[in-house]
Image (cartoon, helix red, strand yellow):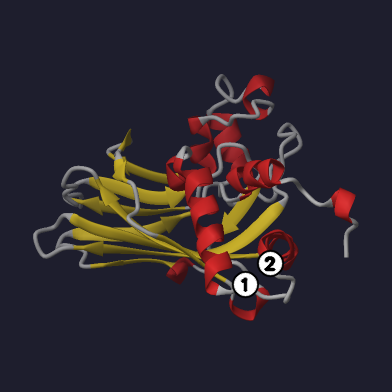
Amino acid sequence: MPRTEDRLTKRQFRQTVALALAALAVASLPSPARAHPHVFADARLEVTVAPDGTVERLAHVWRFDDIFSSTVLMEFDKNGDLKLDQSELDTLSQTINDSIAEYKYFQTVLSDGKEVPMIKPAHLIADFPDNQLLIMFESKPEKPLKVDHKVSFGVYDPTFYTAIDYPDDSDMHISGVPNGCASKVVRPNPDEAIAANQTTLTDAFFNDPTGNDMSKIFATRLEITCGQS
């Protein structure tokens, strides 16, 4: 057990959560990138398309690694019983929600390459099954988003602090895909992404502690294309 003086302060932990819950599967970035992930999570994304062809919801589930989960337990187990009761889970949920809201919940939704504004999730739920931090939330576009062209959905960490991975392509699922549309999971090759964006991915990019939206070029994404043969 860490000494008391080694424990994170509340402010430090909130900052850690803000970074640690940003997500992108970039665990093996090439050497020019000095930033690298410190926290890891497996994720699942469920995209639902309504009968009218518009995106109804994005449902996210993130399960975090043992080390980070233990840190969370240590910080939020106020009564010291080595588990999180509902009150402690509520506090954790609110802390995470407040921390990642400014990062747009690390979602990247693109319509023909342009960012789609998303509505803030009504609820974010933190749970602790099997001593692992589990986060669940749903979101949807601010305006109706018709799936009749090229649309993509993903999660990325603009600070490269955390790697949230989709271990299998089936972990990114879409239901209600309109006729004439095809979906696929795209896993960008880091070397190719860097080579294609050399003018943008400078040392300043990788050393910017606030992150950069261009980091979404590394994000694993679910891509839907319609109307193309």
How many numbered circles does the render carry?
2
The residue closer to the viewer here, 67 or 83, is 83
Quarter of image, res 136: bottom left
Give the mark, 2 or 1, whose residue is nearer the N terminus.
2
Which three-letter amino acid code belongs to the residue tagged 1? Leu
Residue at numbered disc 2:
77
The residue closer to the viewer here, 175 or 40, is 40
Pointers 2 and 1 in contact (C-beta within 8 Å):
yes
Which three-letter amino acid code belongs to the residue tagged 2? Asp
| Residue 84 - label | 1
Q: Locate residue 28 relative to residue 211 in the image: left or right.
A: right
Q: Secondary structure at mark 2?
A: loop
Residue 16 to residue 179: above or below = above
The residue closer to the viewer here, 225 or 3, is 3
Check disc 2: other Cα within 10 Å, few if <14, some if 14-19, many if 20+. some
Q: Position of residue 96 (x, y in %)?
A: 53, 52
Q: Position of residue 225 (x, y in %)?
A: 26, 51
Q: Position of residue 74 (x, y in %)?
A: 74, 63
Quarter of image, res 45: bottom left
At x 57% / y 39%, what residue is drawn?
192
| Extreme residue toward the front, this view | 79
Residue 31 to residue 2: above or below = above
Q: Locate residue 156 relative to residue 70 in the image: left or right.
A: left
At x 88% / y 65%, what residue is drawn?
1
